[in-house]
Amino acid sequence: MRPSVGIRDVAQHAGVSNATVSNVLNRPDVVAPATRQRVLAAIEELGFVRNESARQLRAGRSRVLAYVVLDAANPFFTDVARGVEDAAREAGFALFLCNSASDDGREREYLELLHEQRVEGILITPVDDECAQIAERGTPVVLVDREALDGTRCSVAVDDVLGGELAMTHLIESGHTRIAMIGGPLSIQQVRDRREGALRALANAGLPDDALTFLETKGLQVAEGRGAGERLVGLPASRRPTAAFCANDLLALGLLQSMTQQGLKVPDDLAVVGYDDIEYAAAAAVPLTSVRQPREQLGRTAAQLLLSENDPDHEHRHVKFQPELVVRASTRTQR
Amino acid sequence: MRPSVGIRDVAQHAGVSNATVSNVLNRPDVVAPATRQRVLAAIEELGFVRNESARQLRAGRSRVLAYVVLDAANPFFTDVARGVEDAAREAGFALFLCNSASDDGREREYLELLHEQRVEGILITPVDDECAQIAERGTPVVLVDREALDGTRCSVAVDDVLGGELAMTHLIESGHTRIAMIGGPLSIQQVRDRREGALRALANAGLPDDALTFLETKGLQVAEGRGAGERLVGLPASRRPTAAFCANDLLALGLLQSMTQQGLKVPDDLAVVGYDDIEYAAAAAVPLTSVRQPREQLGRTAAQLLLSENDPDHEHRHVKFQPELVVRASTRTQR
DNA sequence: CCTCGATGTTGAAACGTTTTAACGGCTGAG
DNA sequence: CTCAGCCGTTAAAACGTTTCAACATCGAGG
């Protein structure tokens, strides 16, 4: 089967010219029904499969999008990717999924590759906030889960300040007055935003800023959450917070585990709020209160924005979604 | 920047022919150092990026692999994908990651698409055991985490029978004599294999077959695990198993959660073993004993096998890895 | 001085599509 | 009977590479 059958062979087999075959493929309405049938039959019979490279070379378009994801192992991003994929499929586009794994070398490499492939557009959650590297060489780019600083491209994000405020307000309203926030490093914009929201909630409630103890971590992994839990328990009881707001569900899961190990009860000894509402948050031993982000919709919208990019009247937009608090057992005082 | 610069422009700018530029790109050793420098400078200056479509059209090769994954949301598969990706990168190949999401329509669609793209090879964990659909139209295919029944292609899998045996033997050696296995549906080969292993362990220990109660679930999700937990607790105390072997970590997590909610202690009231050793297994409230599979290596090997596929002396192979038991708190009797 | 092989470079022909302008046949109006 | 207009079809020219046979150039060996 190596000598792959081309449009030419189909044409010959159907007794028409190759242009007609191309028309059947791309503008079926323009060719007479009888001829169309004959061509379709020939295609079927010969097992013809269109060669995308040739099509793309000639047409200049590629019908392929790409999503360069920050961390494919994080359930949050796989859900976003799902949204992207769905939107792409509906528009008849294929999706290149690339994993930069928080490594900017890999990210750069992938961008180069995608450019060589002449993809129609790139969605990216960049490793680096600067993201100046993202070569704007004619390929449209949309930022996902990040906000574009300038007006040079579209972005789709979630309001992290609001998210932080929601989480914190919930804890305050549950009666807590000594609260910890766990997250880091602070070089990450989102951690900063979520803290800002937390502080705003504090101010709204008329509580002093020092009601919030910020415990900075080195990353957003489960292990970091465990470490933070140990630090927390080490505090003198009089100063120990009665609630914790984690910048991330993975941290929260780690914290939860640490509490259980040390014989403390959640939420009675410590109430816990996470962020992202990943599937494993609801499935934790103590189901986790968390801030839900519209993950699939984030991806879906980003893809749609990207696809609209070469409309003549396209304007760069910055879409911002609202997060939502999901209350579960980890903050519900049991009676 | 739309009128993209081609090899031709580079040639003109460097005062050589386009064939020479192509040589610089593909066989740098064949061109004189001085000329090479000049061409490289021109490339740099003009910001030339090679057009993969044209290259592929002419060369017939594409430097792109694809991995059609069964469920992108399952941490197990994202880890396998990571291994595939690494191996592909090292060989200078890009990777198309596609998510069939256990839907054979999607799977078919993707295979069609990949064929149109003329990818060099396809890795797939098929939805359907039959997997006869996988059109063998000249593109090499390697099965991942499945065993090829016939000798028509390569496959890379893990010995599930052995895995089941390991898990079960561990429970038996811990002194349990009434054990449940939770998993399903039985139409999945892997569930059957793991059960077979469990039964073998029973036989080895001289225990009767009915020491194992099989609780069939409808799927391998967390929610199913919770349901199974409730069924388990509902059994009369005299017949209730003292240990459970779950076909999957997600099930085990659900089971764990269900136990905690019902006030039972793991491992004292019920010892639990999972399967896959996903990251969240170690991070569970009670860290989970689990059967670890060499995930990255699975992916890596599959990719390498795929790449060797068009060696002239290639023979289809079926690689089978050994799983490994990781003991954690969920089966360790506390004193 | 001629020939030869080695070394570097090149012109031109593919690769399999899409697209454009032109073509022939047919219909109906004049 | 002619001609404009329409429709379906087609020949041929792209698209940007790679590759292959051919071609200069040059130094060495005869």
Image (tube, coloured by chain):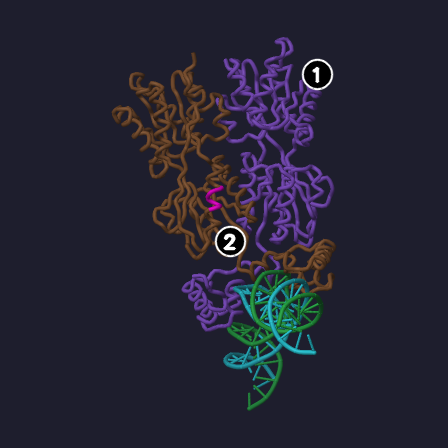
Chain colours: A purple, B brown, C cyan, D green
Q: Mark 1 near mark 2, Cβ–Cβ under 8 Å?
A: no
Please tell me which residue is depicted at 68% across the width and 50% down the height of the picture.
A314
Q: Quadrant of residue C23?
A: bottom right
Q: Position of residue A252 (x, y in %)?
A: 56, 24
**Between D2 and D30, which is closer to the camera in this rendering?**
D30
Q: Position of residue C14 (x, y in %)?
A: 55, 68
| Residue indicated by mark 1 | A210
Residue A136 appearing in the image: yes
| Residue indicated by mark 2 | B119
Which quadrant of the figure contains the N terminus of chain A?
Answer: bottom left
Q: Position of residue B82 (x, y in %)?
A: 52, 39
Secondary structure category for the residue under label 2? loop
Left/right placement of residue B288 relative to residue A237 reads left
Subunit ID for the residue under disc 1 = A
Q: Position of residue A70 (x, y in %)?
A: 60, 38
Residue interval drawn in magenta: B300-304
Residues indicated by labels 1 and 2 sit on the same polypeptide chain: no
Q: Amino acid at mark 2?
A: Val
Please tell me which residue is depicted at 68% across the width and 28% down the height of the picture.
A186
Left/right placement of residue C14 relative to residue B226 reads right
Secondary structure category for the residue under label 1? helix
